[in-house]
Amino acid sequence: MKSKIILLTLILLAILPLITAFQNKPAVEELTLKQAIEKGYISCLFENNKGFTHYSKCLTLKISNHSTKMLTIKINNGIQVNPVDSVYQNLIVTENIFVTLNPQESKTTPIYAMCTEPHDRAPGDNYITYSLSKDAIGVMKCVTDLITRNNYHNSEGQQAVWCVAEGSSLDAISGYDTIAVKKLQELISKLTGKKMPPPPAPNDYKRNYYTQAYTKKITLGGEFEFSFVKPKNILVGMFDKNNVLVRELYKKDGETPGAHKQKYEFDASVYTESYYFIRLVADGQVRLETKVTL
């Protein structure tokens, strides 16, 4: 009996500090990013995430908690930021994330975002800062909601954002992910009344990424050699002088580890800019690049 009492006493002595620590742990206050800024709790800075494509984790948030509170900051999809240099595109956040900060703590968080001005420059290796703008509403917010729910952090999602921003026809949305294309087109069609486009024809090189009926008139191409130790989502894409993706040339999610050689080609009679950058992208980050001059 005495040994049981001693054992129970030891257990209580071990548990009591944990209970005390839990009781003394400060409550966490949850706010949106704008609420925390308005209350003067935090300061933040948005910058481009160098090396990431303009529809992946291309934005970073540097955030500092200046208060004595423990904070959880919610960043909602649909938040928009504008670059200090207007030659670059505005960006819109395409995910919902929470950042928890202890008092006086600072963190840097990468964020999924997409461009909203296809005729301006996309973020790249230059240092760009952004300021908070108004949140998206209406059709654009519904599109970023769909992108967030389905993880459409891809070229199809980017084209849908541009389609809404520019008021383009729905056939401007195309790509390898035909399910994403259809869902995004259907959503925008439902919300705007725009007519759904017909499926791309078998020989439609611009919209039908799986075409076997089209014969290239001027073929340019090359090959990338790469190796990874873990599975990666791989993309070979053509980017123009503004750092904007104009076409995917190869795409495979979950590429197996090991060494690979991947050929690519495109029709230079259709894509006629003076030069393009062909990039190998792994999990949204540019790993290899070559310049093709026409």
Image: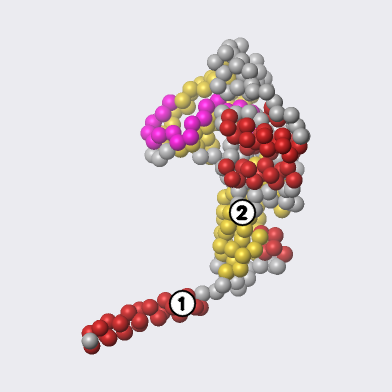
Dot 1: what SS?
helix
What kind of secondary structure does the magenta stretch mostly adopt? strand
Which residue appears at 60% of the width and 73% of the height? 68
Estimate how packed mark 1 is, as few (under 14), some (14 to 19) or many (20 or more) residues with alpha carbons within 10 Å: few
Which residue is more in the foreground, 191 or 173? 191
Q: Circle 1 is placed at which residue position? A: 21
Point out the residue furthest to the bottom here: 2
Q: Is residue 269 above or below residue 158?
A: above
- The answer for how far apart the CA atoms under marks 1 and 2 are is 31 Å
Rendered location of residue 195, percent (x, y): 74, 29
In-image side of 54 versus 116 (left or right)? left
Q: Is residue 249 magenta?
A: yes
Where does the image place residue 272, in percent across and percent down from the top left?
67, 20
Q: Give the residue drawn at x 32%, y 79%.
A: 11
Number of numbered discs: 2
Q: Quadrant of residue 108?
A: bottom right
Quarter that holds the C terminus? top right
Up-down relation of residue 242 to residue 10 (above or below):
above
Amino acid at dot 2: Leu
For the residue labelled by badge 2, is the local secondary structure a helix, a strand or a loop? strand
In the depicted view, which residue is nearer to us: 53 or 196?
196
> x, y (%) of residue 181?
62, 32
Start-end of magenta stretch:
244-261
Residue 6 — which label?
A: none
Label at residue 61: 2
Q: Quadrant of the N terminus?
A: bottom left
Which amino acid, by three-letter code, is at mark 1?
Ala
Residue 91 visible at all: no
Q: Earlier in the sequence, mark 1 or mark 2?
A: 1
